[in-house]
Amino acid sequence: MDNKLKIGITHGDINGIGYEVILKTLDDNRLTELCTIIVYGSPKVAAYHRKLTDTNINLNLIGKPADANPSRINIINCCGDEVKVDLGKSTSTAGEASFAALERATQDLKEGEIDALLTAPINKNNIQSAQFSFPGHTEYLEQLFGQEGDALMILANDKLRVAVVTGHVPISKVSSLLTTEKIITKIEQFNLSLQQDFGISKPRIAVLGLNPHAGDGGVLGSEEQEIIQPAIEQMRDKGIICFGPLPADGFFGSENYTHYDGILAMYHDQGLIPFKTLAMENGVNFTAGLPIVRTSPDHGTAYDKAGKNQANPTSLRQALYMAIDIVKQRNSNDDSL
């Protein structure tokens, strides 16, 4: 009996670079020694993109994960034969195909048919429908597998892990959404994930301020003193090792981040701009705080590169490795109980 982990990969937006980075990643026979791979997508679309890349993958069409051949790259057809690729363009067809794959994969994930999910990039606009009315994958998965506030977006590579308090929200709403209680929740979630998912027994967490220079003692804003600092103090009282609020502007450029196991940013771009500057090619987006494991590359659909065979698959490859590592880490934690 084969005991390898089953990893599901959704194809994302069919008009972007999703299939290109998937095919380039999977064009390595050694991967089937690590796990059983199941692509949720379209054999027709996969064949189209294969002609545009220097890959030679023979996909094994199956109906359900239980039928997967552990020595092959398997694919489950989630789309109709009429699906049409329109490279570099956002279309309703691409959005429907994105959701069809995601819906089937998350159903299998919920039923335990696969062990983890790797999602290729979607277009957050064309995927919107009556079935999907979320800012992104993170919120959709949170609704399926947890409760509001459970999910924590972590961007990670082997040297840097960044989480955010507020995710996919307009910058104009960030300040009003920050509360001491919310920051406490995110610090606790981050600390737990660093322990349970990344195997760090006593994580050191840096907490960034919201305002320029972390408020300069209240001159440039009061959120640090009134909201962020009380959260940090309460976490320290509970034994969590955290520091801050730290000025965000020089934190990454000075390499101060190397002294911490995790960095908690107050909002999306505060954390993701420096992360992607430092780790664009090998960074991974991991959804922590949920009972399931989901990773994705840290880039988007990249319509400007679609069909040109220029996309770098490193981030998606690292997302695959991280999904495997986190599942194994969680299983190890369970075995030690």
Image (cartoon, helix red, strand yellow):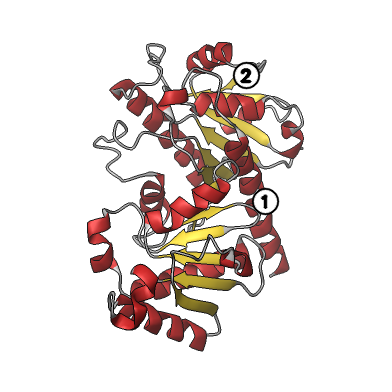
In whole angstroms, how far apart are the C-alphas of marks 1 and 2? 25 Å
The x and y percentages for residue 213 are 39, 72
Q: Quadrant of residue 56?
A: top right
Q: Residue at x 70, y 38 (%)?
A: 35
The x and y percentages for residue 135 are 31, 46
- The answer to whether residue 22 is above or below residue 137 is above
The x and y percentages for residue 258 are 62, 65
The answer to whether 194 appears left or right of 289 in the picture is right
Q: Report if the CB atoms under discs 1 and 2 are less than 8 Å apart.
A: no
The x and y percentages for residue 169 are 29, 54
**Residue 78 visible in image:** no
Element under label 1?
helix
Disc 2 crowd, CA 10 A, few/some/many (<14, 14-19, 20+) = some
Label annotation for residue 108? none
Q: Residue at x 57, y 28 (%)?
A: 22
- The answer to whether residue 74 is above or below residue 51 is below
Q: Earlier in the sequence, mark 1 or mark 2?
A: 2
